[in-house]
């Protein structure tokens, strides 16, 4: 990756211009930069990734009521939607057929594609700008905008809470947020990891139990016991091993997005009326709800703050599952490019 100049539109009357202070590095950035999702959303180069954005408002349009210059503000994975379709009307902007992603999505204003948060500033319609709880550290808040909402939304939908046994597969950026949120919701939280060295961290983050997923005996002890499992794994893996751990009517939700299809055994689903589903980030109102929830429970991501100059190294480490547990880029470092 290398520095380049990009254009941002002048704020229209509904726009908020934000100086970006921190931007998290999501594994989706890596998938996109490498064009690994070419079948579903081919990458248009040059790409500016980044959809975990926190910054300071520097300018607002005349019709903006939610923000004023100087406020802290955040932007996640979406910057626009049509606002009129049934999904938008129901608060599910993330499923709007005309939704604009923060990067690599057709840009309605400037043509070309949208450019994301690895940049100095961004201009976004106020509908898609979120308020940041004042008690939270900004570097650790940035990852909430994707990793936070992507784990909060399905847990909310599947009623994770007290008395529920909940699994989180993969202790990376999404996974560690899933653990913190499930713990705050009062669930019994079990982490499945391929990295035995993450055991102590998992407990510190709020897990009640840790299972090294390659250990068949450990897995076997938990057969038919889970109400809900959140699968955050970014690469090919055996989902049937986890389906077998669900009790009757239990659900596994996939949020991890491996480029290749997973194979599912019918007999892992049928016997206990189990279900397998997916989930895509969350709507705007739900994202604000998640931020407020995190403010109330003092939840932020565990971040390694890096300058932009270390971004290529960070991608290599992410591919080795070597991050504790999210990289957050200090965007002030861009000034020395
Ligand atoms: P990440 O930080 O790299 O974490 C992924 C974790 O998966 C790793 O830490 C590792 O955990 C585990 N893992 C990696 N390779 C594995 C393998 N071959 N077999 C088994 N486990 C493996 O990534 P992330 O940023 O959390 O993103 C995870 C996935 O979610 C990505 O595919 C991303 O694109 C997707 N995503 C989806 C949404 C959505 O809306 N649905 C939103 C954001 C991201 P252990 O070391 O603990 O095993
Ligand atoms: Zn993301």
Image (cartoon, rainbow, N blue to C red):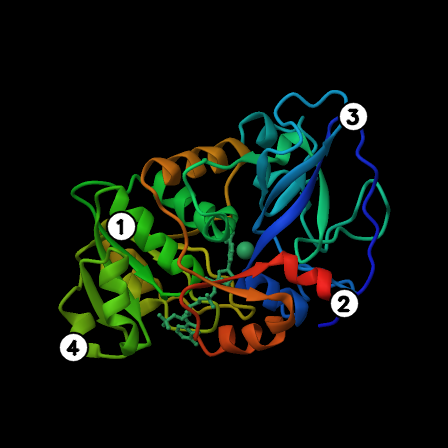
Disc 4 and disc 3 in contact, CB within 8 angstroms:
no
The quadrant of the rendered image in which ligand 2 is seen is: bottom right
Residue 250 circle label: 1
Image-based side of 75 in relation to 162, left or right? right
User: How many residues crowd around disc 1 within 10 Å: few (fewer than 14), some, or many (20 or more)?
Assistant: many
| Disc nearest the viewer among 4 and 1 | 4
Name the residue carrying label 4. 217
| Disc nearest the viewer among 1 and 2 | 2
Real-space Cα distance between discs 2 and 4? 49 Å
The picture places residue 77, in percent across and down from the top left corner, at 60, 48
Query: Which image quarter is the N terminus in?
Result: bottom right
Q: Compare marks 3 and 2 and give the one earlier in the sequence.
A: 2
Residue 3 circle label: 2
Residue 13 circle label: 3
| Disc nearest the viewer among 2 and 4 | 2
Disc 1 and disc 2 in contact, CB within 8 angstroms:
no
Which of 204/242 is in front?
204
Instruction: Determine whether the residue tagged by mark 3 lies in a helix, strand or loop.
Output: loop
| Disc nearest the viewer among 3 and 2 | 2
| Disc nearest the viewer among 1 and 3 | 3
The picture places residue 191, in percent across and down from the top left corner, at 27, 63
The picture places residue 95, in percent across and down from the top left corner, at 58, 40
Real-space Cα distance between discs 4 and 3? 61 Å
């Amino acid at each position: 990756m290398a520095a380049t100049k990009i254009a941002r539109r002048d704020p229209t009357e509904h726009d908020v211009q934000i100086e970006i202070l921190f931007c998290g590095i999501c594994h989706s950035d890596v998938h996109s930069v490498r064009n690994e999702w070419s079948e579903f959303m081919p990458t248009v180069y040059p790409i500016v990734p980044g959809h975990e954005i926190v910054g300071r408002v520097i300018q607002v349009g005349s019709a903006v009521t939610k923000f004023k210059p100087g406020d802290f503000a955040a932007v996640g994975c979406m910057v626009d939607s049509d606002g009129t379709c049934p999904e938008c009307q129901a608060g599910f902007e993330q499923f709007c057929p005309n939704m604009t992603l923060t990067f690599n999505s057709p840009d309605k204003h400037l043509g070309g594609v949208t450019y994301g948060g690895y940049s100095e500033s961004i201009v976004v319609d106020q509908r898609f700008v979120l308020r940041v709880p004042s008690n939270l550290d900004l570097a650790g808040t940035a990852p909430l905008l994707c990793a936070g909402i992507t784990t909060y939304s399905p847990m909310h939908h599947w009623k994770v809470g007290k008395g529920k046994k909940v699994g989180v597969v993969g202790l990376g950026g999404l996974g560690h947020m899933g653990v913190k949120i499930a713990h705050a919701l009062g669930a019994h939280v079990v982490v499945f990891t391929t990295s035995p060295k993450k055991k102590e961290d998992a407990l510190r983050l709020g897990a009640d139990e840790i299972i090294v997923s390659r250990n068949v005996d450990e897995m076997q002890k938990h057969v038919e016991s889970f109400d809900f499992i959140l699968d955050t794994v970014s690469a090919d893996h055996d989902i049937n091993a986890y389906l077998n751990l669900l009790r009757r009517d239990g659900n596994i939700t996939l949020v991890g997005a491996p480029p290749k299809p997973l194979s599912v055994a019918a007999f892992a689903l049928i016997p206990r009326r189990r279900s397998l589903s997916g989930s895509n980030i969350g709507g705007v109102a739900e994202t604000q709800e998640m931020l407020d929830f995190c403010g109330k429970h003092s939840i932020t991501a565990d971040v390694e703050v890096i300058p932009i100059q270390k971004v290529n190294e960070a991608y290599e480490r992410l591919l080795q599952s070597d991050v504790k547990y999210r990289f957050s880029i200090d965007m002030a470092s861009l000034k020395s490019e």
